[in-house]
Amino acid sequence: MARLARTEGLNDVQQEILSTVRDFVDKEIIPVATELEHRDAYPTQIVEGLKKLGVFGLMIPEEYGGLGESLLTYALTVEEIARGWMSVSGIINTHFIVAYMLKQHGTQEQKDHFLPKMAAGEIRGAFSMSEPALGSDVSAISSKGVRDGDDFVLNGQKMWLTNGGSATLVAVLCRTDEGHPEGTAPHKSMTTFLVEKEAGFGEVRPGLTIPGKIEKMGYKGVDTTELIMDGLRIPADRVLGGETGRGFYHMMDGVEVGRVNVAARGCGVAQRAFELGVSYAQQRHTFGKPIAQHQAIQFKLAEMATKVEAAHAMMVNAARKKDSGQRNDLEAGMAKYLASEYCKEVVEDSFRIHGGYGFSKEYEIERLYREAPMLLIGEGTAEIQKMIIGRRLLEEYRIQD
């Protein structure tokens, strides 16, 4: 194993899982990732392989057929997968967040119904907060769920669903005014609905349409979509946790662990960019010697490696904090912010080391250069992370009167 980004204190099971995943990434993902990405092709065979490895059930409790592993194990697994191809880690992440929300907040019936099939990868998850007009302002959502007998009727338009087409279960955040008088704080009148659907595009169930894939600069292969609800009827027993008005808290809990995941993705992409850069620098010759022997390149490699190591350490710390049962929004925000920024910088430095070849689609760094920017905005922009970090610091360091 490489010197960088090692994690101390892992048990034998964790080490075996990570070794297995790393071997899978090296043999089954890296050799095909760039070709699939250029075609924007869904990685069906890779996903099937990850199902067999049990990755879809990594954090789902053993009683539901999962492996019952920690957030740390999951985050380190994601780091390995993102090192191979970040899009594959996105396919896993949205599924994981929905499973985590079900495990933490679902009714017993909801857990019994969904989690075993999610652990096996038979049901695949996606979650939906964002809308076309609101960006990071979740409190401004306009999608609405209205009670009608034993059902709720959902109307609205959602945006930026990772796995929107391939998922068969979507956790959708809507505004519900049931039991909440006018003037109630917006975050207290939101509900998470568990929406089951067919995989694919078009009208995937009555009242629910997935128009098609959104064309993107990078982060290809995985399908990113809109979701349109027009008179979509959802049974009341598919309200997450069985209680309206708790949706904002459910989603924020999911996003908190999702931020650790995005930090892990940034770590994985940065590691791969460093590997490519340090390898190329020893093969490419200028002025009679490998460019790795030029001090300017050594300085770049030193900075890149330090950033890889620092981001990994912060990501591991955030995961361990959550696993210990402590609040980790500060650490998760810091890890996500640092890892995504450092990822962008390490990828760019590797791109510079490659020179003109970095601009060629024949070289893997070209793909990484287009993928890294997604991490700057996924699960909350850098600016949102800094707002969270700043507020939490002021809570922790409040001056006593």
Image (cartoon, rainbow, N blue to C red):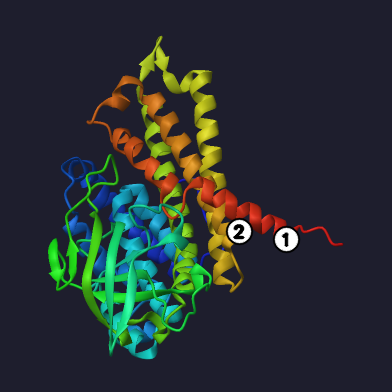
Q: Residue 241, position in %: x, y?
A: 41, 83
Q: Is residue 230 above or below residue 394?
A: below
Secondary structure under tag 1 reads: helix
Secondary structure under tag 2 reads: helix
The local crowd at label 1, few if under 14, some if 14 to 19, many if 20 or more residues have their Cα within 10 Å, is few
Question: As rendered, which of 293 and 211 lies closer to the eye?
Answer: 211
Q: Residue furthest front?
A: 182
Q: Is residue 389 above or below residue 357?
A: below
Q: Which residue is mark 2?
A: 330
Question: As rendered, which of 264 and 203 lies closer to the eye?
Answer: 203
Residue 122 visible here: no
Q: Is residue 198 left or right of residue 126?
A: left
- Name the amino acid type tagged 1: Glu
- Name the amino acid type tagged 2: Leu
Q: Residue 281, position in %: x, y?
A: 40, 26
Residue 212 visible here: yes
Counting residues from the start of the chain, the first of labels 2 and 1 encountered is: 2
CB within 8 Å, label 2 to label 1 = yes
Q: Which residue is mark 1?
A: 396
Residue in the image at 43% along x and 54% along y: 262
Question: As rendered, which of 68 and 144 lies closer to the eye?
Answer: 144
Q: Is residue 314 above or below residue 210?
A: above
Q: Residue furthest top?
A: 287
Location of residue 393 (image quadrant): bottom right
Q: Residue 159, position in %: x, y?
A: 30, 56
Rounded to the nearest angstrom, the CA distance separating label 2 from label 1 is: 10 Å
Q: Residue 88, position in %: x, y?
A: 29, 55
Residue in the image at 53% along x and 63% along y: 319
Q: Is residue 105 left or right of residue 170?
A: right
Q: Is residue 240 left or right of residue 401?
A: left
